[in-house]
Amino acid sequence: METEAVSKGFTTLYGTEPEGVWQAPGRVNVIGEHTDYNDGFMLPIALPHAARVAAARRDDGLLRLHSVQSPDSVTEVVVADLAPGSVEGWAAYPAGVVWALREAGHQVAGADLYLDSDVPTGAGLSSSAALECAVATAYNDLHGLALTPRQLAVLAQRAENAFVGVPCGILDQLASSCCAEGAALFVDARSLDTRQVPLDLAAQGLVLLVIDTEVKHAHADGAYAERRAGCERSAELLGVPALRDVPYDGLDAALARLPEGELRSLTRHIVTEDARVERVIALLDAGDLRGIGPILTEGHASMRDDFAISCAETDLAVDTAVAAGALGARMTGGGFGGSVIVLAERADADRITAAVTDAFAARGWKTPRAFTAVPAAGARRLI
Ligand code: GLA
């Protein structure tokens, strides 16, 4: 249905048929937050929400971009002229991917692209990575580049880092490119090795709720970069390539070598978070899905108290969900707002959602938006 709408929209706007339609999903991270740029571990799932792109090559070197979410404009840029800073707003994400492909030495032509996305923006659900990976996958097919999903994720991350100027890690793009239906994706950010970990919540009577608080605090981008710089500084002081190299059982000794205060807290979050990912993986491998609940909640406390990336809205959602009987809950994504995930018995889901909604209403806050996350497929061609 959506595929047809994107294809038709392309034809109405550009007056020709697209060569195909591709899509790439948003994600939620089950556990492993801010570990990616520390060479550590993480465990995202892809969402059914996705960015879709209808695309056709052009032979005049022009790249034309249109998004259903910005209906009044078409961005036009010459592929050969693409440079960081040359495209602004949402169009920088798809244009950045074409730039990254060109920079990597691939022969890429111009194209007409027609994009549509139902990944909520500003919700910590990787709407940007979805756009990037949809376009990367389309270009890969259209030009027969034969790049792997992992290579496409790396190029998409490069687009975001160097073209858009956001210092993100690899989590979102790997999730969007490489996830599989019915599974979480265990990622080692150093080797970029991945493993599909089956996650059939429904079979065990469980649900994973996503509660989008619909708040995004203004300082989020700067604060993300500060956390990243702090982690890199800690690794430097400890004489290791990345905080991933601080062993969990050597954490106290490592902390004692850092100045008191922020660097210790940042380091403690990363090292304990990597350990939490490993504990979650072990439980999932053993089929104990309920067992991961308390680890998710521990992870939230670590983000709140040590990494200091939580906020009143996400804390309230987590605390209320747990008090209402959730097995576990935590904020997911970069932080400072966005979404919370809640692991719950299916029978408790409505009650938990209502409790969070009531708690927000009691403070006069906007009603959060809740939905159930079922692990979906990564980027792919639709037609
Ligand atoms: C954002 C970034 C990711 C990752 C997460 C936190 O989503 O884009 O690279 O660092 O925050 O885990």
Image (spheres, rainbow, N blue to C red):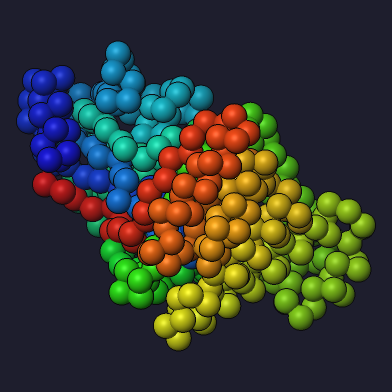
Please say if 244 is above or below 151: below
For the image shown, how many numbered marks are present on the structure? 0
In the rendered image, residue 208, in percent from the top left (x then y), is placed at 42, 60
Residue situated in front as seen by the camera: 41 or 146:
41
In the rendered image, residue 176, in percent from the top left (x then y), is placed at 37, 53
Give the farthest residue toward the bottom. Answer: 286
- Residue visible at 27% across and 33% down? 116
Is residue 365 found left or right of 178 in the rendered image? right
Please say if 375 is above or below 65: below
Q: Quadrant of the N terminus?
A: top left
Is residue 312 found left or right of 286 in the rendered image? right
Residue situated in front as seen by the camera: 72 or 293:
293
Give the farthest residue toward the top. Answer: 72
In the rendered image, residue 96, in percent from the top left (x then y), is placed at 41, 35
Residue situated in front as seen by the camera: 329 or 23:
329
- Residue visible at 35% across and 75% down? 204
- Residue visible at 38% across and 48% down? 371
- Residue visible at 23% across and 29% down? 114
Is residue 315 found left or right of 370 in the rendered image? right
Q: Quadrant of residue 51?
A: top left
Is residue 259 found left or right of 220 in the rendered image? right
In the rendered image, residue 380, in percent from the top left (x then y), is placed at 23, 53
Q: Quadrant of residue 3?
A: top left
Residue 244 can be seen in this image: yes
Residue 178 can be seen in this image: no
Residue situated in front as seen by the camera: 365 or 279:
365
Q: Quadrant of residue 221?
A: top right
